[in-house]
Image (spheres, helix red, strand yellow):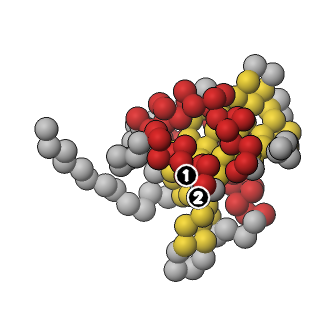
Amino acid sequence: MNPAVERIGDYSVAVIPTPAVPEFWDSVATGFSAALHNSPGDTEFSDVIEALLEGSLGLVILADGEGPQAAACVEEISGARGNWLNLPFLWANGLAPLSRLFNFVEEYAYQHGYIGVKWVTTNDRAPVLAKRRGYQQRLVEYVKEFP
């Protein structure tokens, strides 16, 4: 099953249909391994794969001639005012592909009637990117882990 591909500058981006996830997963698995390391919570790699295969998470891949340069897992979450598109896990090989991925995801969310996009990360460079893109910080999480 081939996903519909859209061009964004020098990149191609696609929302991967659930049945096609196994075909594309190996090309983005390493990036998501690092993304899990930078994400809040205790999600296991196998949980992400399972959620993608059952369709509770979607997969968006941005690539150039050399292969995938950024990807995101997406999910719909309900809010009091409507549905949000949430990015629980994402990764990129640099700021340019990450910016293009956000361009696509934000436009996709807008075109599909979502009220906005949410993402959470522990990456210490994220606040700069979030502010540049017009995101507002809503929550601060404090965590104490025990040995």
Residue 132 visible in the current orientation: no
Neighbourhood count class around disc 1 (C-alpha, 10 Å): few under 14, some 14–19, many 20 upward = some
Label 2, label 1: how many angstroms apart (C-alpha)?
A: 5 Å
Depth check, front residue: 2 or 135: 2
Q: Is residue 98 positioned above or below 136 on the image?
A: above
Read off the residue under disc 1: 51
Residue drawn at x 48%, y 32% as measured from the top left: 33
Q: Is residue 138 positioned above or below 73 on the image?
A: below
Q: Is residue 109 positioned above or below 88 on the image?
A: below
Q: Give whichever of discs 2 and 1 has the lower sequence position.
A: 1
Q: Residue furthest top?
A: 66
Neighbourhood count class around disc 2 (C-alpha, 10 Å): few under 14, some 14–19, many 20 upward = some
Q: Residue furthest bottom?
A: 80
Indicate the amino acid at tag 1.
Ala
Residue drawn at x 46%, y 39% as measured from the top left: 45
Q: Quadrant of residue 123?
A: top left
Q: Position of residue 85 (x, y in %)?
A: 61, 61
Q: Position of residue 44 (x, y in %)?
A: 41, 42
Depth check, front residue: 26 or 104: 26
Quadrant where the N terminus sits is top right
Indicate the amino acid at tag 2.
Ser
Q: Are marks 2 and 1 in contact (CB under 8 Å)?
A: yes
Residue drawn at x 78%, y 40% as measured from the top left: 13
Read off the residue under disc 2: 56
Whether residue 108 sits left or right of residue 138 in the image: it is right
Q: Position of residue 76 (x, y in %)?
A: 60, 64
Instruction: Check disc 1 and report its element: helix, strand or loop.
Output: helix
Rendered image: mark on residue 102: none
Q: Position of residue 83 (x, y in %)?
A: 61, 71
Instruction: Check disc 2 and report its element: helix, strand or loop.
Output: loop
Residue 81 visible in the current orientation: yes
Quadrant where the C terminus sits is top left
